[in-house]
Amino acid sequence: MPYFHVVFTVPEELNALALHAPRVFYDLLFKAAAGALTDVARSRLNIEVGALCVLHTWGQTLVFHPHIHCVVPGGGFAAGRAQWKGVRKPAFFLPVKVLSRRFRTLLCKSLREASRSGVLKVASSSETLAVIARVFAREWVVYAKAPFGGPAQVLAYLANYTHRIAISNSRLVSFHNDTVTFRYRDYRSDNQQKQMSLHVDEFLRRYLLHVVPLRFVRIRYYGFMANRTRASSLARARQMIDDRGPARPTILREPQERRCPRCGEGRMIAIDRIEPAAQPPIQDTS
């Protein structure tokens, strides 16, 4: 069964809201991403999906770029959890344009409600609503990347996002004269590896942008993988998948011995095959 990788990202104009009220913004970001996956999977595939979601706030150069990475199994429960239904195509999950629009609707709606209620504490509620209106008028971007090869590849990928913040020690090149030099990949230049040098104050400023609020949970589960039902749901899914199993191909062999179709007693043994003669090409005489 394939595992799909879906990334929900937000317009840059919303970064100020995330920095002013990170706990509220990140909670709403998680809920909107999970809600978009759940709603679109239900409407397009008529299934209940499960998802493992990870908050990621940095780019390769440590710039602030909040987004949610989701790992989604290629199938879900159908018919009131009475059966397991896989995706129609192993290389395609859900239409990204539909996902992006549903994600935009859910997040903007929740941000408006949070601003009006005062939960999203920013200097001016009217300015916040104006920003939300501007970004809502544009198309958003959701990435649906190629499916994972299997569980081992999923775990290897997640380790890059769950066991470090912003930058790993292996990317640090040097610290000299109050300047930090580190390696990064330039995705706009064919994924080339380059180096960047920043003054230590700027390096620390960028790094601290990605420290989440105290006790904030950066890894969350949704759908049939939600914490309270995950163990029972996964056991049920595995049982359904194993019971269904891939159908064994039927191998058709041409029988070598047959009863005589006339008397029903004699034996007919194939000793050779005579291919039909090639037909002459049809001539167009019109």
Image: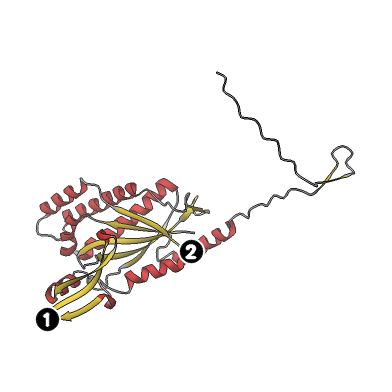
At x 46%, y 55%, the residue is 76
The residue depicted at 42 percent of the width and 62 percent of the height is: 225
Q: Is residue 274 left or right of residue 164?
A: right
Nearer the observer: mark 1 or 2; the answer is 1
153 or 46, which is in the foreground?
153
Percent x, y of residue 53 = 35, 63
Measured from the top left, where is residue 175 in percent x and y?
Answer: 17, 80
Q: Earlier in the sequence, mark 1 or mark 2?
A: 1
Q: Which secondary structure lies at badge 2?
A: helix
Q: Which residue is mark 2?
A: 234
- Disc ID at residue 102: none
Residue ranking furthest to the left = 123
- Residue at the image position 74 percent from the left and 41 percent from the top: 274
* Colouring rule applied to residues: secondary structure
236 on left or right of 97: right
Is residue 120 in sight in this rendering? no
The percent coordinates of residue 37 (x first, y second) are 36, 54
Q: Residue 52 sits in which quadrant?
A: bottom left
Q: Which residue is rendered at x = 58% and y = 56% of the image? A: 246
Q: Tell me if residue 62 comes above or below residue 81 in the rendering.
A: below
Task: Report the front residue among 94 and 224.
Answer: 94
Label 1 neighbourhood size at 10 Å, few (<14), some (14-19), many (20+)? few
How far apart, in angstroms, are the residues tagged by discs 1 and 2? 54 Å
Q: Amino acid at mark 2?
A: Leu
The quarter of the picture where the C terminus appears is top right
Give yes or no for contact between labels 1 and 2 (Cβ–Cβ under 8 Å). no
Residue nearest the viewer, comparing 236 with 283: 283
Residue identifier under label 1: 177
Q: Is residue 253 above or below residue 242?
A: above
Task: Tell me the kind of residue under disc 1.
Answer: Asn
The answer to whether residue 274 shows anywhere in this view is yes
